[in-house]
Amino acid sequence: METTTSASGATVDKATRQNLILRLISERELGTQQGVVAALAGENVEVAQATVSRDLSELGVLKVGSRYLALPHDPGSAGIEVLPSFILGLAAAQNQVVVHTRDGTAGAVASVLDRVRGLKIVGTVAGQDTVLLITPDNEAAEEVSGLLADVCRAKTRPAGNVE
């Protein structure tokens, strides 16, 4: 089992470190491996960039625009890769984002978006071909809309690649 040493000298196992990475990505706007290394150091976990690169790849973290998004693996559930095929259009409106989808896919899109770590979404409501995303504020709605537009334009890549 791969372990990392914390600044206090305690060892942190791989699963704990990867869960910490997912939490940090969901709480902060991280977009580089060095940024993740620094954030881990701030949590008293010292780790090499190569280890972070492997962790990001194993976790299925994507770099969308200038930041990371993570979708925890859930066997049998749709992943973020379905979004470009299902989403037809996006529109930010105040603290909400209206997502127009292919007929019958709104539920799947909402399910994926509810599970993505790093998106500033309070909740989703899905119909047949429309998902309403609620965000904390207008700025978050614009950010979420932009990130989803990048995903749909395939401006994503696995985060474990060399930056």
Image (cartoon, rainbow, N blue to C red):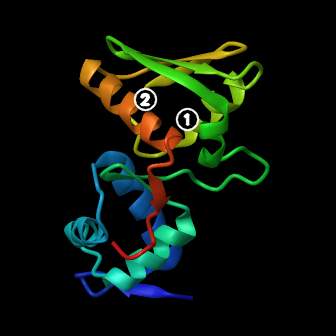
Mark 1, Cα crowd under 10 Å, few <14 / some 14-19 / many 20+, is many
Image mark for residue 113: 1
Q: Are marks 1 and 2 in contact (CB under 8 Å)?
A: yes
What amino acid type is highlighted by mark number 1?
Answer: Leu
Q: Please give the label number shown on residue 51.
A: none
Q: Is residue 20 left or right of residue 87?
A: left
| Mark 1–mark 2 distance (CA, rounded to whole Å) | 8 Å
Amino acid marked by disc 2: Ile
> In which quadrant will I find the C terminus?
bottom left
Read off the residue under disc 2: 121
> Going by the image, does 7 lie left or right of 83?
left
Q: Position of residue 50 (x, y in %)?
A: 38, 84
- Residue for point 29% across, 56% down: 30
Q: Note whether 54 is above or below 40 in the view shown.
A: below
Compare residues 10 and 130 and report the one nearer the observer: 130
Determine the residue located farthest toward the front in the rendered image: 153
Q: What element does badge 2 sit on?
A: loop
Q: What's the residue at 20%, 67% (across, down)?
A: 42
Q: Quadrant of residue 49?
A: bottom left
Residue at 51 percent across and 48 percent down: it is 154
Q: Horizontal and vertical percent for residue 116? A: 51, 43
The relative height of residue 162 versus residue 9 in the rendered view (above or below) is above
